[in-house]
């Protein structure tokens, strides 16, 4: 196994594990469409507003690196605009429901 393959596999495995962790930490707040069930601010969400999006994207990048195939990145052409749209909708819903609490959270997180 060459270095690129190893790095890609490592990135994909670690990122996917973090996707699962983010999903578990969301608990009942998880939904496919943006909703404001609860403001999750613990675990990965204490630093990242959208860790599932970030780590899904990194998983795809890891797979592309491991497979040595750039076209594996093509799903990101669809995912990134959808994730951006959903993130915007989530932000608007959470701002509306949690107001100052959400604003403080947003300022304390990276993305």
Image (cartoon, grey):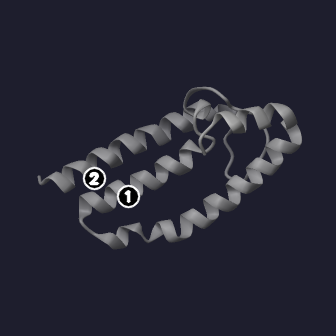
Distance, label 2 to label 1, CA atoms, is 7 Å
Picture residue at 82% right of the left edge, 47% below the top: 93
Q: Looking at the image, can residue 38 be seen?
A: no
Q: Which residue is mark 1?
A: 61
Picture residue at 33% right of the left edge, 47% below the top: 11
Quarter of the picture containing the C terminus is: top right
- Circle number at residue 74: none
Q: Looking at the image, can residue 40 be seen?
A: yes
Number of numbered discs on residues:
2
Q: Quadrant of residue 84?
A: bottom right
Picture residue at 78% right of the left edge, 37% below the top: 103
Residue 51 image offset from top left, x and y in percent: 55, 42
Q: Quadrant of residue 101?
A: top right
Instruction: Please determine whether, in this image, residue 27 is positioned above or below residue 53.
Output: above
| Contact? badges 2 and 1 (CB < 8 Å) | yes
Q: Which residue is mark 2?
A: 8
């Amino acid at each position: 196994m060459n270095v690129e393959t190893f790095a890609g596999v490592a990135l994909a495995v670690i990122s996917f594990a973090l996707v699962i962790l983010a999903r578990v930490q969301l608990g009942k707040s998880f939904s496919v469409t943006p909703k404001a069930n609860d403001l999750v601010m613990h675990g990965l969400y204490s630093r990242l507003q959208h860790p599932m999006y970030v780590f899904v994207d990194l998983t795809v990048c890891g797979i592309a690196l491991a497979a040595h195939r750039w076209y594996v990145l093509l799903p990101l052409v669809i995912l990134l605009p959808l994730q951006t749209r959903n993130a915007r909708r989530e932000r608007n819903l959470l701002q509306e429901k949690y107001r100052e609490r959400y604003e403080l959270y947003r300022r304390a997180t990276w993305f």
